[in-house]
Amino acid sequence: MNCHNAIDSWIENGVSMGGAYSWGQNDVLVIDSLTFYGNALMRYALALAGRQGKPPQIQDWGEAMRMQEGMLEMLYSDAVKCNVVITSHITFGEDTANPGIQRGFPSALGTKLPPKVGSYFNSIVAVEKQSFGSTITRTLRT
């Protein structure tokens, strides 16, 4: 899979929407979600290797992670002028700057990619939900 294919030429119901490289500041590319995109890339890496339905091997992880980070790099480039919104689940991992401390990171493949994901975005928003009995509060954090 060439990651460029996902953003070069978007076709919706048989109508070409162009690609993210041709979109402007009034357009928004939404990917829902980075987590599911990673799962799809892993299935694709397994299919390329002829191992559909089997556990991934180390090279499958490497290939899928390379494709996932490649997509983030392309969307971060100056060539993409549109707004980009990518949702993600949260995965917890150790903060390398503070050993023993767990932090929440955007869910991406592997353990090395999740801490890097935030570097591809100017803004990050987290939604937190807390329940106190029957009262639910939601907090948006940037």
Image: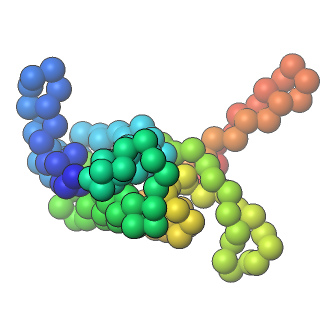
Q: Position of residue 87 (x, y in %)?
A: 47, 43
- Horizontal side, residue 59 vs residue 2: left or right: right
- Horizontal side, residue 30 vs residue 54: left or right: left
Is residue 76 visible to us here? Answer: no
Is residue 125 visible to us here? Answer: yes
Of residues 28 and 2, which is closer to you in this image? 2
Could you say which quadrant of the image residue 132 lies in? top right
Of residues 62 and 91, which is closer to you in this image? 62
Q: Residue furthest right?
A: 133
Could you say which quadrant of the image residue 100 lies in? bottom right
Q: Position of residue 141 (x, y in %)?
A: 64, 49
Q: Position of residue 108 (x, y in %)?
A: 50, 55
- Image point 57% across, 44% down: which residue? 89
- Image point 57% across, 66% down: which residue? 111
Q: Position of residue 139 (x, y in %)?
A: 69, 40
> What colouring style does the render use?
rainbow
- Image point 70% across, 69% down: which residue? 94
Could you say which quadrant of the image residue 32 lies in? top left
- Horizontal side, residue 39 vs residue 140: left or right: left
Is 15 located above or below residue 44 in the figure?
above
- Image point 69% across, 71% down: which residue? 95
Number of callouts: 0
